[in-house]
Amino acid sequence: MTRSQTTLAADAELTGVAFFTGGDVRVRFRPAPAGTGVLFVRTDLPGEPSVPATIEYALELHRRTGVRRGEAEVQLTEHVLAALAGLRIDNCRVEIDGPELPGLDGSALGFAEALRSTGVRELDAPRKTLRVHRWVRAADGDAEIVARPAEGHGPAAAGLRLEYHLDCGPERPVPPQNFRCEITPERFLEEIAPARTFITADEIPALRAAGYGERVDAADLLVFEPDGTVRGNAPRFPNEPARHKLLDMIGDLALLGCDLHAAVASRKGGHALNRDLCRTLRAAATRGDAPITEAIGVSTDPAAA
């Protein structure tokens, strides 16, 4: 089952602080024609260079995802991409005046609310789709992410179902927890977008020493103390960390640049494994490996992304 491509009905804009680099950032979301995908534009650089939000341009970063083409580099893309994908906004020009998107409150809610306020407009072109027909796995030690065919047939199978199993280990203050969800705009807004980035208190000194998070405090994310309590604010959900990891999955899987029809489960996975799965699925689509994936209108040329 395919659908029509979409874009924004009008511009949206917001400002915030970059979590890692600490700068003040302004980001503008603008409508884009069919076939554009999500395009990040660095308005602060000469010539306003751009980079498509596709796996071909993904960077290997710790604790976040970014993309780069030439001089155009943008980091912490996952929350914005999750908001766009969760709301099914396919084509968008994202103009940013710095190298990192704002962290806001550590969730995707601010981005989602700004995007939703403009309205969504359908375009006269079908959305690209990638349907998984056989199990595909990426792993690193005891962490793994698996994509398998969605259950059912026809419209019942035409969607993305995600689940995340969080287990930081018996010595960590974040308790084991799970979350699963079929991704629709309504469920994304209510159940996923508000989930915030989390961290343990003992991780903060090393991040500060590396120059990260100088303008971030406990109001901007969930900080777990050694006894399991949360510093500064209360969780929005009992399993908010697992929901946030699933939010990150949505944003990273959006680097495929198309709808993914599959059931995807991750256990202890993070950004690196999400990107590995994207590359594996993209490679299968490029090879035309029909037993594994079925690519419907998916470009295999990075230059065409």
Image (cartoon, rainbow, N blue to C red):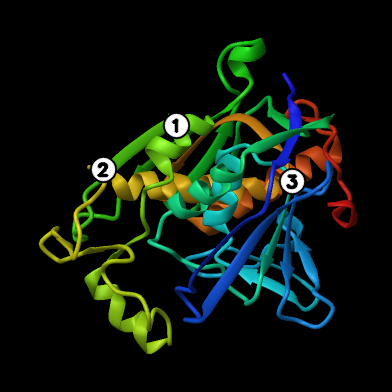
Q: Is residue 207 above or below residue 107?
A: below
Find numbered disc 2 in the image and state the secondary structure of the residue it sits on: loop
- Residue, x 29% and y 55% (percent of image)? 168
Cα separation between marks 3 and 1? 21 Å
Q: Is residue 152 left or right of residue 176?
A: right
Q: Which mark is residue 176?
A: none
Report the quarter where the N terminus lies: top right
Q: Crowding at label 3, few (<14), some or many (≥20) Cα neighbours within 10 Å?
A: many
Rendered image quadrant of residue 237? top left
Q: Which mark is residue 187?
A: 1
Residue 267, position as x, y percentages in the image: 41, 44
Find numbered disc 3 in the image and state the secondary structure of the residue it sits on: loop
Q: Earlier in the sequence, mark 3 or mark 2?
A: 3
Given the image, on which type of amino acid does mark 2 rest? Phe
Residue 29, position as x, y percentages in the image: 66, 56
Residue 102, position as x, y percentages in the image: 51, 68
Q: Crowding at label 2, few (<14), some or many (≥20) Cα neighbours within 10 Å?
A: some
Q: Is residue 155 left or right of residue 76?
A: right
Q: Is residue 31 above or below residue 258?
A: below
Q: Is residue 5 left or right of residue 303?
A: left
Given the image, on which type of amino acid does mark 3 rest? Asn
Circles 3 and 1, Cβ within 8 Å, touching? The answer is no
Q: Earlier in the sequence, mark 2 or mark 1?
A: 1
Q: Crowding at label 1, few (<14), some or many (≥20) Cα neighbours within 10 Å?
A: some
- Count of labels in the image: 3
Q: Nearer the viewer, residue 243 or 221?
A: 221
Q: Which residue is mark 3?
A: 91
Q: Nearer the viewer, residue 170 or 16?
A: 16
Q: Which mark is residue 237?
A: 2
